[in-house]
Image: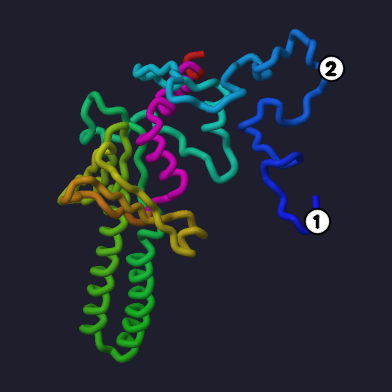
Amino acid sequence: MDPGEPRDPRGEGARRPQDDDDSYGWRDPSLDDDPDYPDGEPYGDEAAYGRRRRADDTFDETDEYEAPSFTAEELEGLDRGGGPRRFLPLEDEPTTLVARYLFPTERYRGEWKRHWIHLAKPVGIGAAATLLLGYLAGFLTKQNINGLVTVAVLVWLGVISWVAWEVFDWYFDRFILTNKRVMVVNGIVTRKVAMMPLLRVTDMKYEQSALGRMLSYGTFVLESAGQDQALREVKHLPNPNELYLRVVEEMYEPQAVEARLGKDDEGDDA
């Protein structure tokens, strides 16, 4: 063939597509007479490994739901200490403050007070009022103005009483988790109970500031499918990462919680 002539793609030596030629590619002559590797069959035990999926292929499928099973090693991994993924211990019994708000078929998972940072503002105001009013009372005493000293002492007592009220309110403020809902109970004289069913929670997140990451507290934000949300934002919750894992596990893997509780009960009985 003249080098200047164009090559006929159908002539001798033309490249043939693999799919159109059964003999395309290199073959080992030693395998031609081997009965273990017959022609036209793929290697391996399953015929599906040598060809593409066809429309008439059928697969065994079942609509019956099978509950997940958990091994002892997997359950031990949930309770393993150390590292970022550790779980808060499950409480055995609710306190008398919380027990009155739970119905008999509800499984109690735990209750938590808000982080002590929740008291930073009232305690700071009480400390500042003590310093300022103490200095003012000393100054007025030197000036022999006893009436204003009495007023300063009464103002200080009022501020301290307010601080004490805030501390008691913090003590009775609880975040509660069960297998069916999350609740917030607070108030001393006027009690407030807010709840959200776990089945209605469509989104949940927590936020931590720089100080929150240092002191291990955060704000939980829960989104519900309903329009009127009684419990949406809960501030100053302790150990937010561990508490977040606890709530999410209760929402998406309740079988794992029940399995771990059953294992703990067997260990206690033993």
**Residue 122, picture quadrant:** bottom left
Q: Considering the numbered disc 1 on the image, is that residue within a helix, a strand or a loop?
A: loop
Side (left or right) of 24 relative to 191: right
For this rendering, which residue is in front, 201 or 210? 201
Q: CA distance from mark 1 to mark 2?
A: 40 Å
Per the image, is 257 magenta? yes
Q: Amino acid at mark 1?
A: Pro
Q: Is residue 233 above or below residue 62?
A: below
Farthest residue in the right direction?
Answer: 30
| Label 2: how many Cα within 10 Å (few below 14, some 14–19, many 20+) | few
For this rendering, which residue is in front, 211 or 14? 14
Per the image, is 92 magenta? no
Q: Residue at x 28, y 43 (%)?
A: 201
Q: Residue 85 in the image: state x and y as whole percent.
A: 53, 42
Q: Main secondary structure of the magenta part?
A: helix
Where does the magenta region start and end? 237-266
Q: Which mark is residue 30?
A: 2
Q: Residue 221 in the image: state x and y as whole percent.
A: 32, 53
For this rendering, which residue is in front, 205 or 176? 205
Q: Considering the numbered disc 2 on the image, is that residue within a helix, a strand or a loop?
A: helix
Q: Residue at x 18, y 46 (%)?
A: 226
Q: Residue at x 42, y 33 (%)?
A: 90
Residue at image mark 1: 3
Which callout, 1 or 2, points at the residue further toward the start of the chain?
Answer: 1
| Label 1: how many Cα within 10 Å (few below 14, some 14–19, many 20+) | few
**Residue 144, picture quadrant:** bottom left
Side (left or right) of 75 relative to 16: left
Tag in front: 1 or 2: 1
Q: Is residue 214 above or below residue 157?
A: above
Q: Amino acid at mark 2?
A: Ser
